[in-house]
Amino acid sequence: MENKINIGVIGYGYWGPNLVRNFIESSRAKVSMVSDFKTELLLKAKTRYPAIEVTTDCQDIFTNPNIDAIAIATPVSTHFDLALAALKAGKHVLVEKPMTVTTDQALRLIEEAEKRNLVLMVDHTFVYTGAVQKMRDLVVSQELGDIYYYDSVRVNLGLFQHDVNVLWDLAVHDLSIMDYVLQSQPYAVSATGISHISGEPENIAYITLFFPRNLIAHIHVNWLAPVKIRRTLIGGSQKMIVFDDLEPSEKLKIYDKGITLNGNPNDNAEKVYQMLIGYRTGDIWVPKVEMKEALQTELMHFIDCIEQSKRPMTDGYAGLQIVKILEAATCSMKNQGQLVKLNLAEVGV
Amino acid sequence: MENKINIGVIGYGYWGPNLVRNFIESSRAKVSMVSDFKTELLLKAKTRYPAIEVTTDCQDIFTNPNIDAIAIATPVSTHFDLALAALKAGKHVLVEKPMTVTTDQALRLIEEAEKRNLVLMVDHTFVYTGAVQKMRDLVVSQELGDIYYYDSVRVNLGLFQHDVNVLWDLAVHDLSIMDYVLQSQPYAVSATGISHISGEPENIAYITLFFPRNLIAHIHVNWLAPVKIRRTLIGGSQKMIVFDDLEPSEKLKIYDKGITLNGNPNDNAEKVYQMLIGYRTGDIWVPKVEMKEALQTELMHFIDCIEQSKRPMTDGYAGLQIVKILEAATCSMKNQGQLVKLNLAEVGV
Amino acid sequence: MENKINIGVIGYGYWGPNLVRNFIESSRAKVSMVSDFKTELLLKAKTRYPAIEVTTDCQDIFTNPNIDAIAIATPVSTHFDLALAALKAGKHVLVEKPMTVTTDQALRLIEEAEKRNLVLMVDHTFVYTGAVQKMRDLVVSQELGDIYYYDSVRVNLGLFQHDVNVLWDLAVHDLSIMDYVLQSQPYAVSATGISHISGEPENIAYITLFFPRNLIAHIHVNWLAPVKIRRTLIGGSQKMIVFDDLEPSEKLKIYDKGITLNGNPNDNAEKVYQMLIGYRTGDIWVPKVEMKEALQTELMHFIDCIEQSKRPMTDGYAGLQIVKILEAATCSMKNQGQLVKLNLAEVGV
Amino acid sequence: MENKINIGVIGYGYWGPNLVRNFIESSRAKVSMVSDFKTELLLKAKTRYPAIEVTTDCQDIFTNPNIDAIAIATPVSTHFDLALAALKAGKHVLVEKPMTVTTDQALRLIEEAEKRNLVLMVDHTFVYTGAVQKMRDLVVSQELGDIYYYDSVRVNLGLFQHDVNVLWDLAVHDLSIMDYVLQSQPYAVSATGISHISGEPENIAYITLFFPRNLIAHIHVNWLAPVKIRRTLIGGSQKMIVFDDLEPSEKLKIYDKGITLNGNPNDNAEKVYQMLIGYRTGDIWVPKVEMKEALQTELMHFIDCIEQSKRPMTDGYAGLQIVKILEAATCSMKNQGQLVKLNLAEVGV
């Protein structure tokens, strides 16, 4: 009992209760304090978990000497201040995605965590799902061959946010999955989008991401769709993946399907050209995928990182990379698709 | 029998046999001549329809005084020359989509047809399907309210063309449907895409179309997808449509779903904002849709137009409009999403 | 607080925790005691709800004078003894389905409850779902016309029970839904089935139920299916329903589809016959269905019945009716489909 | 040309045109004569194939000395007389399914064909599809392990036949597939069903088939369903199959899923029992399946059998087996599920 990591949670709205539940259900952490500025949410926490101390003032968490680590599940605009204060108080930090509102903020948090040897982890939950782990394995093991494209759709009738546009709310998931699976960084982005409520952020958006070596990615997000779609296609030179996250069990399908190139592509005669491209259609394979709750896996990884002073899989740099793309995409979207370069080298990635 | 419209068909590859079959099965037309430069295709036509005269020289069709109208089902690059020759020979013309390779060519054909009082129709087949007709009715009758967006996906493992990119092969369908359903023209386009075979046209493409009055459209086309998807979402302020063309019978679903705006949008306090947006989820309605083969409907319309000197629903201007967008989108795609304005007024549309 | 109904729960395995959670989350009941003979389950209950008293001896619940009502969530074979003891202790009873192992037991419980003016309710949870309520409304309002058939499939790879066959485990759901929706009792049953493990109960079963007035029902249940299917078809003379309980939101579809009969059916000539039957295919309608957790609705109904001395929707007679059918079906199954009559009148239904 | 098998086709209603087209498109047969008593159908045949001779009198086909083989695509009740006349005229015969109305008739045709050394083949088309061939391969190769069950659903809003019940119209497909795939004969049948139109045959039916060695089969057919379902489940001790014939390409899915039995099944203690049954869930595999039109494969097999004096895969005995089951099932259905034994040995199978 005494060896448990002691956690404080800031924010008990939508996601906070999931963090608390998963920390508590593990045998390796305890949650000693929860803060939220809404007292009705604190009452809910207290009813469910009488042993947890609750407060409307998050300073109580920062100054609590027994707390080892702080999980921050508040609106994006507050992430930077809260995470920085937590790090300065000597606490390890798990912060919701998107990590911050600007890349500068993200860099500042990374710097502070490194200076103090604290764990700084971003809650890119999807990265810890069995399906995403399997997709990464298939890419890393070259089973798909060269990766040609990554195409993702994430739409539904969703809660319109008014502090961030739909990219920061929905595309952040796809970008974090893509970043983890592809292991390659885009060099430029072109995005378009629209707001259907005067004065409010864009509720539909489309991003194209350009990568080196003939790889392209595209993400479509929409808060105003009549149906829920969560589908990703990954095309490779050998195989292709369809990832449908709404399927209860058959989430991933691997298609042994594609084109084959033969002969000399410089020869222009039609006959030769037609011989150049062959079409393959083979079997489909639906691998069994680990169905454990991803958040449980992720939080145990957070605790491992604290206990063993390891760098998390979704560390500050992973968070920074996503913020950088979201920033660039938002800028491109304001300019109706104008290309925005991502100088990733500059930020040390 | 003597009152039947006499048809010549140029091109007996993929689409030509469908044209011939549908003309013949109607009681209002006869096909007297088919040309193709491949003799094995002509042999196939002759075996199936011994009464049809076949030729490798399409001049035989132009010069045949008994032929009233010519249907052209050849590669895009040949449309302009063949259609112009047909018009000059005094024949009515039905030409495959896309109408031509350039807007200038399309304008030239329109001019020639108008000068000679000949019917010039473009084979935008989808416009004649029951599902598309129903979608247009729903838009025109204001049942959807204000239209917010049009989003279409048309992907599969398809034959790579080497004379045109995937926009001209696949997006042409969506653009013609969109043009007919929305009854509104985009003012600018931003497109991205990629070719995965060195020296060949783009096989994946994404287009965003910007319209006046807060309407946006997006089309995703791909020749290299592991699964076939044919799905269009249309979002309106009152209702929303999902059109899935792969569904054998339940192709259209109308969702009584969306957001409602109340109060004063200029008031910035959060509380007021949250009251501003309401979310509606009501019943779904799957209207019965006419399942007749669209090409039959379309060809009868072509014959009506010839007999009654009417302007076709999918006339030269409809064809021109699509070519203009394809031209602009291809230009934008070469420049990685750079906005290209569509000066539709210039071309008299 | 003092007016809350005080509940004791016997059995904290699969379903017990759901009962406890739903009683507690309502403001109208409190759970003061939970019993189970497995101490590890009691530990789980205690950790989650420190205020609840736990015991391995259910007598503690019967003898607790503060407890008003007892919910029994134990294996079927124990239902009778526990429910009878609870009633004799003067407690209202909510018992899991199937109510008992025999109709005699069910009758005995009804008698005991009536004698003591206690509420006896059977936990036919599905009856309280929005989808089932809507189906009943459609039947009662005659919107479907005359009901022709009820066909249900409930299969998956499920836990093999060893005390009851698959009918008692899975078909019990369909029978309780059917009984509630159709408002009509079958007069006979024919069932077939098989066990694939020597000495164990049947893991696949098919029941046909014969009703008066040309109505037939069929239920297919299977613990050894590769996929999960939960689908019911209801055919009526005017409309037909497909109920797919695995659909996250579009659970019910109403088809305006069917046959129409015209003319004189005694005329045997083919021509006349062909005119007799017409086929209608109209729109499909997907009504919005209440998505609230059914168990919450059900438990509030249980409390209403206690407070207002009302007869529950799923009372002892509803429970008895299902047990009677399960008994008859099991008997028919042992005799490879031999018809078994249901003398429902005898049991006073 | 002279070596082509010369075919006469009797019946040009729904299926006849498919026979004619497939014979003609092959290079190994010619259709020289078509008969039907409806002249409008003969007109249709003549328009499409001017070279074919048409007649309202099928005697013209029997007596035509140039005709080698006759394909019979008429209502079931006429199969016996026509097939017998054809055989007596010395022609090879391909007859639609069901082969005849009674087993006696089927036996008589087998006898006549054997006496004259003529090919007698029944048009069990599904047997020649890639999906069914693959299923049989999986069963024969023991990849599924021991076969536990075969469950098939074939329902839709279909044309009500008035000469045969729904078993003879729809279940005939499932029975012929099952017979071919399982390679095992049922020893008894129990069937239930109902007619919703007074005086007309049953339009809904359910059959259970009992096989030796713990194998059970069930078929559900319905002419009055709001949706079309064509789905077969095959459960084996090692693997299980889902065959969905409405899937355009992914028709077969093989699930590496099931239960495993360990230890001593005679030990009755619960703990031991629970260890007895293990549950496996592994990958799913969607094999590529030959998509060629089955009728083409089948007709070439018919020609092979004629040319090489071979016994067809779907010979008279296969046809007889299906008729025998249909007869027994109809009898059981009249008696509300009463078991009917199939004395298959008696008929020499």
Image (cartoon, coloured by chain):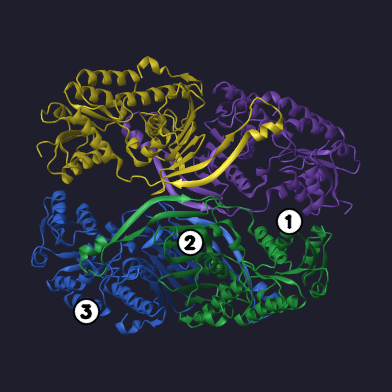
Chain colours: A yellow, B purple, C blue, D green
Q: Nearer the viewer, residue D282 or C35?
A: D282
Along the horizontal axis of the image, is B263 left or right of D287?
left
Identity of the residue furthest to the right in this view: B65
* Residue at figure coordinates x 66%, y 35% from the top left: A275
Q: Report helix, strand or loop for mark 1.
A: loop
- For label 3, the residue is C108
Along the horizontal axis of the image, is C319 left or right of C6?
right
Find the distance from the CA under tag 1 to the CA under tag 2.
31 Å
Q: Report helix, strand or loop for mark 2.
A: helix
Of the residues under marks 1 and 2, which one precedes in the sequence? Answer: 1
Find the distance from the CA under tag 3 to the CA under tag 1.
74 Å
Q: Are marks 2 and 3 in contact (CB under 8 Å)?
A: no
Q: Is residue A202 visible?
A: yes
Say few, some or many: other residues with alpha carbon within 10 Å of mark 2 (under 14 / 14 to 19 / 20 or more): some
Where does residue A148 sit, x and y in percent of width and height?
51, 31
Find the distance from the CA under tag 2 to the CA under tag 3.
51 Å
Nearer to us: label 3 or label 1: 1
Q: Amino acid at mark 3?
A: Arg
Along the horizontal axis of the image, is A171 left or right of C39?
right
- For label 2, the residue is D139
Where does residue D226 sit, x and y in percent of width and height?
53, 62
Q: Amino acid at mark 1?
A: Ser
Nearer to us: label 2 or label 3: 2
Identity of the residue furthest to the front in this view: D308
Q: Is residue B73 above or below residue B340?
A: below
Q: Nearer the viewer, residue C28 or D314?
A: D314
Which mark, residue B81?
A: none
Which mark, residue D26?
A: 1
